[in-house]
Amino acid sequence: MQDILLKQKEYFATGATLGVKTRIAALKKLYAAICENEDVINKALKDDLGKSSAESYICEVGMTLSEISYQLKHVKKWAKDKRVHTPMAQFASKSYIKKSPYGSVLIMSPWNYPFMLTLEPLADAIAAGCTAVVKPSAYSPATSKVIADLLGKIFPPEYVAVVLGGRAENSQLLDLDFDKIFFTGSVAVGKEVMRRASEKLIPVTLELGGKSPCIVDSTAKIKLAAKRIAFGKFLNCGQTCVAPDYVLVHEKVEDEFLKALKGEIARQYGDYPLENANYGKIISPKHYNRVKGLIAKEKIYCGGECDDKSLRIAPTVLKGADWSDAAMGEEIFGPVLPVIAYKDIDTVINKINGGGTPLALYMFSQDKAAIKKVTSRVAFGGGCVNDTVIHLATSAMGFGGCGESGMGSYHGKNGFDCFTHEKSIVDKKTFIDLPMRYQPYKKLMLKITRMFMK
């Protein structure tokens, strides 16, 4: 690993990755390789997570291609020097911002969307002009191998390299002197990544998680809310960092919402979801047993069926959930949805703000004042009004958390900026040299200086 990084630093130092044409050519290679290997990618995602080919394209391959296309469309503009205003006190000169890639970066990705969450930040890093070492998750071995094979065929290791393995390899990589670390994963591991990076003062972007609330107030269009919540929650078998973790529903519409949600689950996944070939599975026995243990049997409204052999848990809704329940004590990251009734929106706001900052927040309402109050007063990474999860599919907006749910953002321009350092440069002319800044300071010169600097 040390040898890989040294070669990448040497390669970067030659300036080979700086030209915009080089970046565009690399992105086009990546795009073409993904298209050519879509069937192989889909099979790997099926093996690891039980994803259907449709879900694999919608949530992994398609989103990655969309991000690469967005980078290709805009990278020329983003990479240009940006002229900025120069104050009169700096006459005569021009000021500009030079976009410079960080250098050799480490991208550590998770298992829940193993293809997209590896290749999207890689595309952003390439667009920015960096070299990259990619470390996919050991929990999704089939997809990790496909990523290694795909990238190994189109990029030399001094430009893009893949390191496979588990915790030992992760730890060894964190010992190295990268110029930037991009990590997606759990809060616990994110803290360790940041601790290790801080020892070397390496900048980090952390895309973490948290318990993302979903509020359904009394003015919401209940059937539509149930439809969109069922989609966002049970997508990828609930293993989505921005999935609605729990629902806070106004007591006036609780029964109506629960009935509509149960109907939507049956409509989208069938009466027997565990027999649905397009419904995914939990990534590993360890995670399966953890999620299964969060189901309070006495509160099951619908679902609850589990298959220990296939690691599948049916979409499960818990009615009458309480803040003290096991399912409310941690991020669920599975197909279990606690529903809590509420009376007052201010109490909801205070309760959410009293916990960790969630990565996402969703609100279903037709009350503009209530929407404004919640989105203004609650701290969260990003979210949707009258929908779920789709905000992360928009390259024109950055995606990221805040507080315990992460720091920094990427996608689109934010992704380019994530791997770019902005050098502030003043180009001073030599045909004139104003004397005000030099000693000895005289009253007249100070008077003139004050005029310039006000």
Image: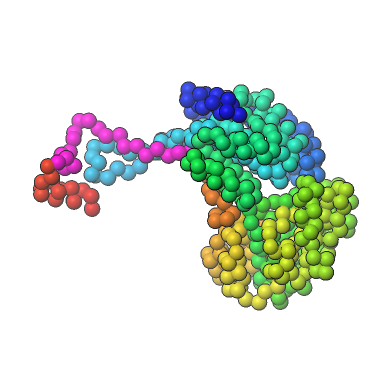
- Specify whether 359 is left or right of 145: left
Q: Is residue 57 left or right of residue 375?
A: right
Tell me the residue at 50%/42% (across/down): 199
Residue 247, image quadrant: bottom right
Residue drawn at x 66%, y 29% is 151
Relative to 72, residue 370 above or below: below
Q: Residue 318 in the image: state x and y as whole percent.
A: 78, 66
Question: Compared to 391, does 435 lie above or below?
Answer: above
Viewer-side residue, 290 vs 437: 290
- Looking at the rendered image, the quarter that the N terminus falls into is top right
* Magenta span includes 419: yes
What's drawn in magenta, residue-wise? 418-439
In the image, taking residue 77 as reference, residue 410 lies left or right, namely: right
Residue 83: x and y, percent? 37, 39
Image location (x, y in percent) of residue 220 = 68, 69
Relative vertical location of residue 184 with respect to residue 175 in this rendering, above or below: below
Residue sitting at x 75%, y 37%:
141
Q: Is residue 259 above or below residue 63?
A: below
Q: Position of residue 28 (x, y in %)?
A: 61, 29
Inspect this view and state whether residue 199 appears: yes
Q: Is residue 205 visible?
A: no
Asked if residue 240 lies in the magenta stretch, the reply is no
State the count of labels.
0
Colour scheme? rainbow
Residue at the location (14% across, 41% down)? 439
